[in-house]
Amino acid sequence: MKATTLSTSTTPGEQFRAGFTRHIIHTPQLLTAVLDVDGGPWAAPDPFHSHPHEQITYVVDGDILFLAEGQDPIRLTAGDLFAVPSGVPHSIQLLSVRARLVDTFHPIREDFL
């Protein structure tokens, strides 16, 4: 397998719903998505969701509220990270006008490809 690169400044992202654009890079076992979220601040969080993938997210820019079932909400800003184990319902609420998040998943999210 050869090395792959991705420039989020020169490669168009996929707008998968209003206010959400993502750029994806992956190997056979690992997927990273740069997620740009616009249209904030939101009055309420996104609906909770879960997936079988482990997830780690790095907040590059903006302010979000991270919510996970059974835990108190946590305000996160640029430089913060959160991890979500497989199967745990979770969500975010955009607190700033926009945010950039870097999501990493294992195994890869086939539904994103």
Image (tube, rainbow, N blue to C red):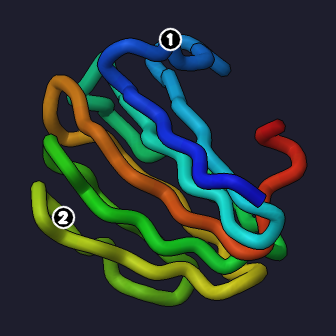
Q: Amino acid at mark 1?
A: Pro
Q: Quadrant of residue 81?
A: bottom left
Q: Residue furthest front?
A: 2
In the figure, is residue 7 to the left or right of 5?
A: left
Q: Which residue is mark 2?
A: 76
Residue found at x 34% / y 82%: 72
Where is residue 3 shown, x and y percent of the image?
60, 53
- Element assignment for label 1: loop
* Other-residue count near label 2 (Cα within 10 Å), few / some / many at <14 / 14–19 / ≥20: some
Where is residue 65 shown, x and y percent of the image?
28, 58
Q: State the mark number for residue 12.
A: 1
* Other-residue count near label 1 (Cα within 10 Å), few / some / many at <14 / 14–19 / ≥20: few
Residue found at x 37% / y 13%: 10
Residue found at x 44% / y 41%: 34
Nearer to us: label 1 or label 2: 1
Where is residue 33 shown, x and y percent of the image?
54, 46
